[in-house]
Amino acid sequence: MNELFQPGRDFAVALDRGDPLARFRDEFHIPRRENGEEEIYFAGNSLGLVPKRARKYVDAELEKWGRHAVKAHFEGENPWMPYHELLAEPMARLVGSSASPSEVVTMNSLTVNLHLMMASFYWPTRERHRILLEEHAFPSDDYALESQAVIHGFDPAETLVRLRPGEGKHTIDTADVAEVLEREGRSIALVLLPGVQYYTGQAFEIETITRLAHEKGCVVGFDLAHAAGNVVLRMHDWNVDFAVWCTYKYLNSGPGSVGGCFVHERHGTQEDLPPLAGWWGHDKKSRFRMEPGFRPIPGAEGWQLSNPPILSLAAIRASLDVFMEAAGMEPLREKSLRLTGYFEWLLARELGDSVEILTPRDPRQRGCQLSLRVKSNVPGRTVLGRLETYGVTCDWREPDVIRAAPVPLYNRYEEVHRFVEILRNAL
Ligand SMILES: Cc1ncc(COP(=O)(O)O)c(C=O)c1O
């Protein structure tokens, strides 16, 4: 793809003109600087922008609350009782659960869902209690896994097996995962890896890793926080046991919004996988008989505990509708490959001596984010501060990485061009 790119601004502008998804930028509020200019917002990997239509969707629920109050659970357009069901199909499309939307539910938040999944899927024994994760995993995952080990009476130092990048590398090769599984797989109860790693931006080979781990009898879960809405996923076909994600990053659903959860169809009705129970996971027909005796809804919905926050689900619906109008992940990914490919090419060409890219160079092994390490004598944090002064929003992750994510739904090639110019000045 590289030889297709050219360094001038005109080239970026021409790419924007030819972009079939360009109109979707207008669906979002782009933050503005004090001088009124639009920011270059490359932080959709942290908090996605608000879709303009979210206000209408949320207002509709406030209106219903005002008009029908408690009866809105059963009355009016889109009653609240089954409201979460409206999200199942588009969400299933985005994470690749084409077989059945009942594999997907929108509920709780990511870390809560991770614990709920482990309550069902993590049954450690003396011989097989270990959990495979990556070194420098997102801390919440690390804490959750450690605490699960402790709850089951194991020492996290022995239970958690952390995959490290090979000598001189920043990311973990699938061959490294395969080697650990080959050597230690029979002692590993659970493999819990990210779809896309938050720090390096590496996209893991989910299908291959799942197959290798299953061959050793491990359960396989994925954290899709940075993958959902970013890369094409086929969680059903890839046979992953479970997955969890948040919706406030690439899925643009608002701060702290409700998370997602995938449970493979083959586990949906298994009685040896009891969910932690709550009334919203109970058989819908008899839920309001208010009787004891939990009978889970088949599929991912059986893991629900509580009635969900409708205002938050309304905002997610607004965003999912934008994704569906863009025809799902495939066209977005196509643009993303080109947008981030151009970003990488321009950075390497213009700033190769002063900026190191930690993210894999192979486009199949990354999403839209590039993780940058500053090599010049200006400290990375200072560089980030200067970027902000010039209207760029991206973020910093300790110890030394600037993460920048051009998002195909609302970012432009021209912004990538400007970002590189601003970064050059900042250095
Ligand atoms: C990779 C990853 N895992 C877990 C979380 C925690 O998410 P939550 O606070 O919704 O539980 C985040 C949040 O940014 C994340 O990036």
Image (spheres, rainbow, N blue to C red):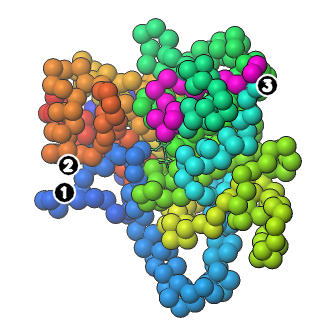
Measured as percent of width and height from the top left, residue 372 is found at: 32, 28
Image point 40% across, 46% down: which residue? 46
Q: Is residue 238 above or below residue 391?
A: above
Q: In the current view of this chain or complex, which residue is farthest to the front?
A: 153
Q: Amino acid at mark 1?
A: Arg
Q: Is residue 372 above or below residue 292?
A: above
2 or 3: mark nearer the eye: 3
Graded by Cα atoms within 10 Å as few (under 14), some (14 to 19) or many (20 or more), the crowding at tag 1 reads some
Looking at the picture, tell me which residue is in the foreground, 342 or 234: 234
Q: Amino acid at mark 2?
A: Gly
Label located before the other in sequence (2 or 1): 1
Residues at marks 2 and 1 touching, judged by CB atoms closer than 8 Å:
yes
Graded by Cα atoms within 10 Å as few (under 14), some (14 to 19) or many (20 or more), the crowding at tag 3 reads some
Residue where numbered disc 2 is placed? 391
Looking at the picture, tell me which residue is in the foreground, 237 or 340: 237
Instruction: Answer whether residue 319 is magenta in the image.
Output: no
Q: Is residue 212 visible?
A: no
Residue where numbered disc 3 is placed? 217
> How far apart are the alpha carbons under marks 1 and 3?
53 Å
Q: In the current view of this chain or complex, which residue is farthest to the bottom?
A: 67
Residue where numbered disc 1 is placed? 33
- Quarter of the rendering occupied by the C terminus: top left
Q: Is residue 152 visible?
A: yes
> How far apart are the alpha carbons under marks 2 and 1?
6 Å
The residue segment tinted magenta is: 126-143
Q: Quadrant of residue 51?
A: bottom left
